[in-house]
Amino acid sequence: MRTRFPAVIAAVLAAMVAVLLGPGTASAATWPVIANGDSGPQVTTVQHLLSHRGYATTADGRFGPATEAKVSSFQSANGLTADGSVGPLTWPKLVVTVQSGSSGSAARAAQTQLNRYGYGLAVDGAFGAASTNAAKDFQSKHGLTADGIVGPNTWNALVGGSGSGGGGTSRAQLAASIDANSRISLLTYHVSGVVDNDSTAQANITDTKNGTTAETSNYSDVGEREVWLSTAMLNGMLKLATERGYTFLVTEIAGGDHSSTSNHYKGIAFDADNMSVSNATFVSACRAYGATEALDEGNHVHCAWE
């Protein structure tokens, strides 16, 4: 397994900076990592903030190559490692203070975040009385100064929290739920028989649960790579168990040996076997949960989310 020193060092440095700058700076510990393959209001927030910073980005809630390229450009211009993911060092430079009278993309980003907590604001880019009152209420409930100003600490609490009222769930939380679900089994070896313990389905989910990237297999067509698992895929996998009640075995996610262009290597696909329903029924359910690729491969089912 490739040691993840850069990510660890970045997190430590961010935490040290927060301590040195004092309570006025948001803690790096709760800034989430948003990356290629993610979707939902967290991504929309990033896209609005990028546009405010001068990197015009379509706010469609889908973190694809275009958004990743804009993040990388922003990072390069701000002295950050241009890895294309928005984490503890990028968020503090990306967020901007929003308050009564603010308008534009930054206001839309704040409204999007407040709506994750059920405030039901119009995301119109006009931060008026309703938005200010929502911000004050959120701050009061989260131990912050209730001034209605969305500054670094409020941004930190907003994006770092799990939200409510349709706000979505983080990658790590989804992986933890999958790992704990008795209906989902995760293979601890590769169906190929080749030993690479760091890239099994279980290892991929464990790494994701711990907030890090998953690995492709060192014997695969693309070699060993680090990829973020798609939240859309993880959410679909979990719903197959929690909403449909299916039991199944996940045989491969990012690991294994597939074609060189396989979606497995992008962290957006998984293979399933030993389902409690037919292959055709499982394929149909994957598509119902947004899979853009759902295939009956005979001895297993393959589902992927773009």
Image (tube, grey):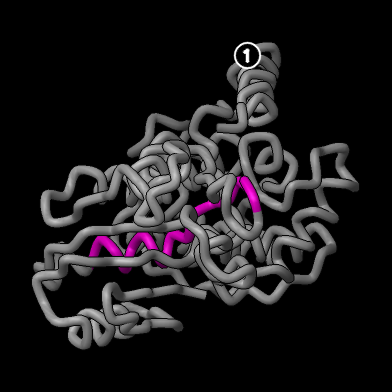
Residue 188 at what x, y percent from top left?
A: 30, 43
Say which residue label 1 marks: 19
Would residue 255 be found to the left or right of residue 9 on screen? left
Residue at point 62%, 41% (across, down) = 87
Residue occupying image coordinates x 78% and y 62%: 69
Quadrant in the picture for residue 18 = top right
Image x and y of residue 133, in percent = 44, 54
Residue 176, image x and y in percent?
A: 29, 43
Eyeballing the image, is 173 above or below 88?
below
Most distant residue in the front direction: 193
User: Disc count in the image?
Assistant: 1
Q: Nearer the viewer, residue 1 or 109?
A: 1
Identified at 30% across, 78% down, the residue is: 286
User: Hey, what amino acid is under mark 1?
Assistant: Val
Name the element at disc 1. helix
Q: Please tell me which residue lies in front, 83 or 145.
A: 83
Q: Is residue 14 magenta?
A: no
In this picture, is 67 found above or below 6? below
For the view shown, which residue lies furthest in the top direction?
A: 20
Residue 260 visible in the shown view: yes
Percent x, y for residue 11?
62, 26
- 237 relative to 128 in the view: left or right: left
Which residues are the magenta region? Answer: 223-239
Mark 1 Cα within 10 Å, few/some/many (few <14, many 20+)?
A: some
Based on the displayed image, in which of its 4 quarters is residue 78 positioned? top right
User: Looking at the image, which residue is at 37% across and 82% down?
Assistant: 294
**Can the viewer see residue 38?**
no
Quadrant occupied by the N terminus: top right
- Image side of residue 181 versus residue 50, left or right: left
**Foreground of the two, 166 or 286:** 286
